[in-house]
Amino acid sequence: MATTRRRESDGGKTLDAAAFLAPHRARALLRHALDASGSAFGSLGLTMLKDAKVFGAPIAGSGHTGGFIAIGSVSFRTASGSTVGCVTAKGPAARIAAYPRILQDIIDSCTLSD
């Protein structure tokens, strides 16, 4: 996690390199990195788009054998005054079927510790 935050992981280095390429070459590099081994980006993709109201998880169908989870803004107010958010998951149905429960467990553990 620490190397990812510092952009020193294999995935971070690949993304940094792709930023200097033409779009078609960057796409080819990223697809190769995703499909070749999974070590560049891991088996589960996760992105947090804290200000996003509408979004979709990127590059479905390549790499990330565990799927891809994208979490957007969690600050939408409901009529009752509570807040809700938006999450999308892509991947093999059997694999991602457990993600809602896992996310709920994470939310519950955060709520309990606050």
Image: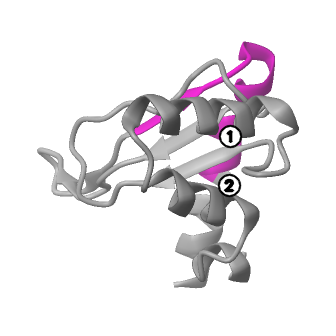
Callout 1 touching callout 2 (CB < 8 Å): yes
Give the vertical position of 112 relative to 98 (above or below).
below
Q: Quadrant of residue 68?
A: top right
Give the crowd class for mark 2: few <14, some 14-19, many >=20 residues within 10 Å.
few
- Determine whether, in the image, residue 110 is placed left or right of residue 3: left
Q: What element carries label 1?
A: helix
Q: Residue 101 carries which label?
A: 1
> Badge 1 local density, few (<14 within 10 Å), some, or many (20+)?
few
Give me the C-alpha separation between circle 1 and circle 2.
6 Å
Q: In which quarter of the image is residue 2?
A: bottom right
Q: Mark 2 points at which residue?
A: 105
For image coordinates 46% across by 33% down, the residue present is 57
* Picture residue at 80% right of the left edge, 17% below the top: 94
Q: What element carries label 2?
A: helix
In the rendered image, the residue lying farthest to the left is 79
Judging depth in this view, the residue of 24 and 15 nearest the camera is 24
Is residue 82 in view? yes
The range drawn in magenta is: 87-104
Q: Is residue 34 left or right of residue 47?
A: right
Find out whether residue 84 is within the magenta segment: no
- Magenta stretch encompasses residue 103: yes
Residue at the image position 39 percent from the left and 39 percent from the top: 22
Residue 36 on image: x %, y %: 83, 33
